[in-house]
Amino acid sequence: MRDSRLTEQRNPRSSGIDELDALGIVDLINAEDGLVADAVAEEREAIARAIELAEATFRAGGRLIYVGAGTSGRLGVLDAAEMPPTFGTDPEMVRGIIAGGYEALVRAQEGAEDQSEDGSVAIDEIEVGEFDFVLGIATSGTTPYVHAALARARERGAKTGFVLCTSPSQELRDRHDVVIAPLVGPEVITGSTRMKAGTATKLVLNTITTGAMVRLGKVYGNLMVDLQVTCDKLQDRGERILAVTLDLEQPDAVNLLERAHGHVKTALVMGRLDVDREEATRRLEAADGALSRVLEELDRE
């Protein structure tokens, strides 16, 4: 019986993969991976809509919450986990929920995705509300856990979205505020959605959160200015940003970052305006955290 889901169909281009040598396998997988970016680009307007929803959510004090199972769930948790070190966000601002809980992050809990009631419970446990945006991720489009979680989120007044890699029904589009469906085609290994579908999902999630953070003023130019120094790598990155942006010698950058308590954006305002940390913080707060606005006001002055 033929499955109508694109993610479950057999790929004719890889039907002989078991007869290839190692280099042939690499070339085949690489050729299929080359299709992913174009599939994501086809969904550019829907992804932009998701960025707008996420930005509005954050400005209202709400959260972006990913919900998924298996690979999809892990990718959501991964993207959420990378927000605090990259953009200095509160860990609650972007959250990931995966069917099966923490154990499912490191060991497959395949049966968990079928427990629809658990999806509803997960939404209740974190008290999803009207200011939140819940984005379900299910590359096949059929995961019961995800559908139940989204249904409960809507009941509680939240905005909802869906990311999948098969053709969405009109009913699904009508049900949610945004639906993103990069159609990457059948997998090299039939049904192994950790491959092209997983890659497409990561690209989509990265774009949504990065776009929202840029819109919130957490990036200056293309510099990661809202990072908080928490390790040697980020210390070095922060020092280099200050040195390049303010034309400082390395010791001066170190000193300025220390006076800013390790916050690069604050240090940049301190250095450009020649003010102390308290005044730099006040100016950033008045500009809703947008460094560009603070510097524009300086130019006008």
Image: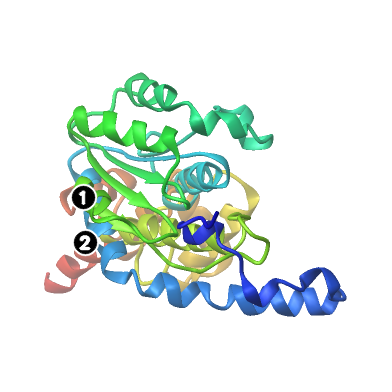
Query: Which type of secondary structure does the marked residue at label 2 adopt?
Result: helix
The residue identified by callout 2 is 294
Left or right? Give the position of 115 relative to 251.
left
Q: CA distance from mark 2 to mark 1?
A: 34 Å
- Tell me which amino acid carries mark 1: Asp
Q: Position of residue 261 (x, y in %)?
A: 45, 43
Specify the amino acid type for callout 2: Val
Residue 211 appears left or right of 28:
left
SS at mark 1?
loop
Q: Which residue does the image show at 45% across and 47% down from the upper left? A: 138
Name the residue nearer the viewer: 94 or 74.
74
Residue 17 lies, in percent from the top left, at: 77, 71
Contact flag, marks 2 and 1 (Cβ < 8 Å): no
Of 241 and 150, the residue lying toward us: 150
Provide residue 277's location: percent of width, then percent of height. 33, 46
The residue at the point 44 percent across, 23 percent down is 118
**Image vertical order of residue 232 relative to residue 115, above or below:** below
Quadrant position of residue 240: bottom right
As drawn, which residue projects farthest toward the front? 1
Of all residues, the one furthest to the left in this rendering is 300
